[in-house]
Amino acid sequence: MKALLELTKVQLKVTVRDFVVAFFSFAFPVLMLLMFGGIYGNKPTPFYGGHGTIDVMVPSYIGMIIAVTGLMNLPLTIAEYRDRKILKRFMATPLKPYYIIVSQVMANFAITLIGLLLLVITGKLVFGLHYLATGPSFILAFLLSIFSIFSFGFLIASIAPNANAATAIANIVYFPMLFLTGATIPLETMPAVMVRISKFLPLTYVVDLLKNTWLGVSQSYATDIIVLVIVLVVSFSISALAFRWEYT
Amino acid sequence: MAIVEVRNVIKNYGVLRAVDGISLSIEEGEIFGMVGPNGAGKTTTVECIEGLRKPDGGTISVLGLEPYKERAKLYELIGVQLQETSYDPKIKVWEICNLFSSFYGNPLPYSKLLERFELTEKRNSYVSRLSGGQKQKLSIVLALISNPRIVFLDELTTGLDPLARRSMWELIRGLRDEGRTVFLTTHYMEEAEYLCSRVAIVDHGKIVALGTPRSLIESSGMEERIIFEGTVPNIEELKNIKGVLDVQENQGEVAVYGKGADLLQNAVSYLQAKGISYKNLQTRTPNLEDAFLKLTGRKYEEDKA
């Protein structure tokens, strides 16, 4: 247990020292919020079904942070550790191997949570953010989103033949999801064809679920939940079969 | 009582047989070396013994444990340095030491280890800021945190400059002096000759020869060579001296090949008795590298990376 905590702590430190990850998980979402909040404010608008721009953007940007930690940082770290034979070195200790994966998940979970808090605090202090979720619905949606997207990231780490390939795959997956799922640019502003493409990207369902639970919209979340559970189960199953601790 | 016992170990990678029936045993307290060119099967053999790979055939016992099956127990008792592991560049020296300490039930205090390996000043440095020698010292520190009875060092000194390599040799001797058994692989013959009580020469997945460096050199039947500048009027007479096997003369340089401890003395006495003047007399005693060349029929240098 001590080993798991130490691994997570070290992983957290190492990740935060990486400028790119720290910038895109912590600074970038807050800067976007300040910029668009400064333009549109948080007054209810019919464009967002009577909700304020900030109240819609904060949960969407949380989806963006999950994409950075889950689709970029998680798979790239694991692939790099495999390339550097760090995973193999850990195998030659009494450490339980799955602790390595669990610690990666916990560290990236913590980074996502810090990013979420920074967004929420900024939104609250600067723009009077509203949290309208009923009961634990948003928290459950957040957890499902994390596990689903992290599994997808773990799948990238499992199928990539090396760290360079993992970087390439992660970028191919990450950037369309960043722009075509509503995580940064609202789907409401997009032409029909782009909305149709968005239906094929798992992050679309994350953003939809996070946004609507946050706003307390009473609607059925069945589609979002089913898609994310399928992504979770399929990614995890393939990873469990394909994952290798080292290249042979 | 041997603490490592390897019997007829076989390991295949696809159609390639990387380890082809290797047997050896290691006594407690010795520095045992495995030498051979890259691709000879050294690393695969060590990784089977360390429990990182499952052999396709044969048996291995390390401290009475079956390495691959009883890894969890084994790794409390041995320390491992792997070839080519490079740690996260953004981790600090003390952080990685602290991390490895958390893996063990009863770790050695790492601050003392850092002091011993002259890394105390670097404890707050990122791993990426260490020199090659310091990185290798750090991997020994990490291997020692478990307070191991056996330390495995795989190509520890590869890529280090001669000075760093020398200082590493003294540190390895220090490990033996405090009662640890050391198993090392290297492709530097002079390293094996200097450090090891026994050496296994490996080529194409097989042990070609095994013994003390001295006995390997002697059993290879290599000759000593004496070279000097001068003119010998009667070559046949020189050839008949005790221990001399052959004499060759070439452009004023004479090479005397032979065997035996008193070869040099006999040759020099002959030259003096006959009043033959000689300059720049040198002797060349065969070393482990010569023995390796003879035993494997290879040109060693060409195989080096």
Image: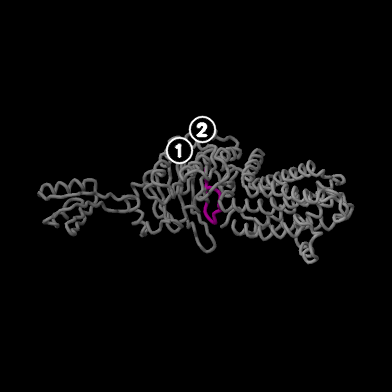
Where is the C terminus of chain B found, in terms of image quarters? bottom left
In the rendering, at what x and y percent does residue B123 appear? 53, 37
Amino acid type, callout 2:
Lys
Amino acid type, callout 1:
Leu
The residue that appears at 13% across and 55% down in the rendered structure is B232
Residue A230 or residue B247, whichever sits in front = A230
Subunit under mark 2: B
Labelled pair 1, 2 in contact (Cβ < 8 Å): no
Residue B151 or residue A231, whichever sits in front = A231
Dot 2 falls on a residue whose secondary structure is helix
Q: Is residue A98 visible?
A: no
Task: Tell me which numbered mark, 1 or 2, is placed earlier along the sequence.
Answer: 2
Q: Which residues are magenta?
A: B50-62
Q: Which residue is label 2 attached to?
A: B112
In the rendering, at what x and y percent does residue B98 appear? 58, 37
Q: Which residue is label 1 attached to?
A: B175
